[in-house]
Amino acid sequence: MMDQPAIRELVEAVRDFLENRAMPELKGHTAFHARVAANALGIVARELELAGAATAQEKERLKTLLGCDGTVEDMNRELCRRIRSSDLSLDAPGLADHLERTTRDKIAIDQPTYSGFKQAQLRGV
Amino acid sequence: MIPDFLPALSRALGTAIPGLDRLENTMRLSGGASQETWSFDAIANGLSEPLILRRSPGGAPRGQGTGVNSVPLATEATVIEAARKTGVAAPRVRYVLAPDDEVGEGYVMDRLAGETLARRILRDEAFAGARPKLAYQCGEILARIHSVDTTSLASMLQAMDGAAQLKRYRDIYDAYDYPHPMFEFAFKWLEPRLAKSARRTLVHGDFRHGNLLISPNGVEAALDWELVHIGDPLEDIGWICTNSWRFGAAHKVVGGFGDLADLLAGYEAAGGAHIDPEDVRNWIVYGSLKWGIMCMTMYQAFLHSDHSVERAAIGRRSSETEIDLVNLILHGAM
């Protein structure tokens, strides 16, 4: 067991430093890169919080969809192979639903303010 | 900054600009992997002419193996002049560099006034009056680009129809060997739809924010013709309508500033064909898929050459295009 602070608290502390201490003293391209760096830490923080449950659910859906088990990467490779080879048709039961749920979970971590995600949220689940 | 090629450039421009005295205010505007852009003024007969030099990096020939479909800079200049003769708003080419000039590969064109930054065009008060007109004007410009006589250009341009475009991005995606089921789904969905594309015209190839010079009066010029090719004209219309170029204003389908109906009205008024919005939607799907794979390319650049946080972060923008593909394909959004 690691000591405190938790990894999430460390990431938040670095992000806070970048945004509120470093950025006001930076200029031009370096200031822009600091903003990008702070945003990247936002992805890290959200991934720490959300990815565990999202990946577990993704894995369960993949097992049902494919009828086999494996690592989440292996199953994603298998899903790609079946879509490409038409072993799985685009209207296969559960496929569209799986892709939408997986994509929503990814964008909620990567860019939760993205306009396309807002559109999806307005539509509901 | 005074570039080492300035004296040679000054000599080369002697015939193109009669009475040329000197070049001033040389400034590097951008340095991409495929070209450098320099801004400078030519002083002739006591007057100052604002000009732009587009040159391959370090003056070397534009690489064909860079993974981009760039045409040589001399071809770019030839196409711009052909397009201008058809009435396309584009900067006048003043001089195409010759090997003897020892400035490298490139050309000099007029520097026009205007803005290319989407953030300013979409939000600054100065552009509020122009914004409602932009979609219609984009339609007019695209109709003219797509009516350029390609007889004399065809031999110097690549022909890339819908099927060839998909194949090209399929190959790039395959090479990265990282699974994106939503991209697989989009490829499969697009194959029969883009295979039907039969129109063949000149295609700008990168008609979007950043390459549109816009002033408070409207669209002044289409810039950056390096991806010009022969293909389906709907590729250009779909690209400016791809959500990645709407910068948050998703309800304004054309570049975040206008409606597709306005663009298509301008297109028809300027002599373009009648176009079914559903056909445009197929090319918006293609645009999202293409940008998604380009984000994967940015990650590859991070992995192999440019270790900046900026490159790394763009890799995580693939999922933006995936949610756009979900909205477009699974829910019929625009």
Image (cartoon, coloured by chain):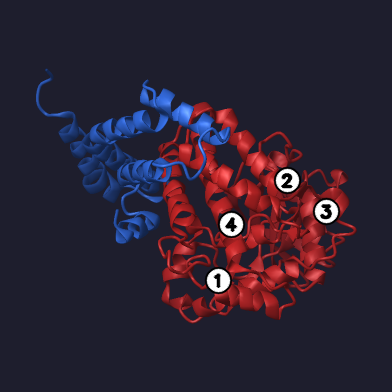
Chain colours: A blue, B red
Give the mark nearer the N terminus: 3 vs 2. Answer: 2
Front position among marks 4 and 2: 4
Task: State the separation of the CA atoms marked 2 and 1.
Answer: 45 Å
Subunit of mark 4? B
- Residue B5: image tag: 2
Left or right for A4, reference B256: left
Q: Label 3 belongs to which residue?
A: B12
Give the mark nearer the N terminus: 3 vs 4. Answer: 3
Subunit of mark 1? B
Q: Position of residue A118 (x, y in %)?
A: 33, 58
Q: Quadrant of residue A97?
A: top left
Give the mark nearer the N terminus: 2 vs 1. Answer: 2
Asked whether the residues under marks 1 and 3 belong to the same chain, the reply is yes
Say if residue B89 shows up in the picture.
Answer: no
Q: Label 1 belongs to which residue?
A: B260
Is the residue marked by circle 2 packed among few (<14), some (14-19), or many (20+) residues within 10 Å?
some
- Note whether B221 is above or below A51 in the view shown: below
Task: State the separation of the CA atoms marked 1 and 4.
Answer: 14 Å
| CB within 8 Å, label 1 to label 3 | no
Subunit of mark 2? B
Q: Amino acid at mark 2?
A: Phe
Q: Label 4 belongs to which residue?
A: B282
Front position among marks 2 and 1: 1
Q: Amino acid at mark 1?
A: Leu
Give the mark nearer the N terminus: 4 vs 2. Answer: 2
Is the residue marked by circle 4 packed among few (<14), some (14-19), or many (20+) residues within 10 Å?
many
Task: State the separation of the CA atoms marked 3 and 4.
Answer: 46 Å
Q: Position of residue A14 (x, y in %)?
A: 22, 37
| CB within 8 Å, label 4 to label 2 | no
Subunit of mark 3? B
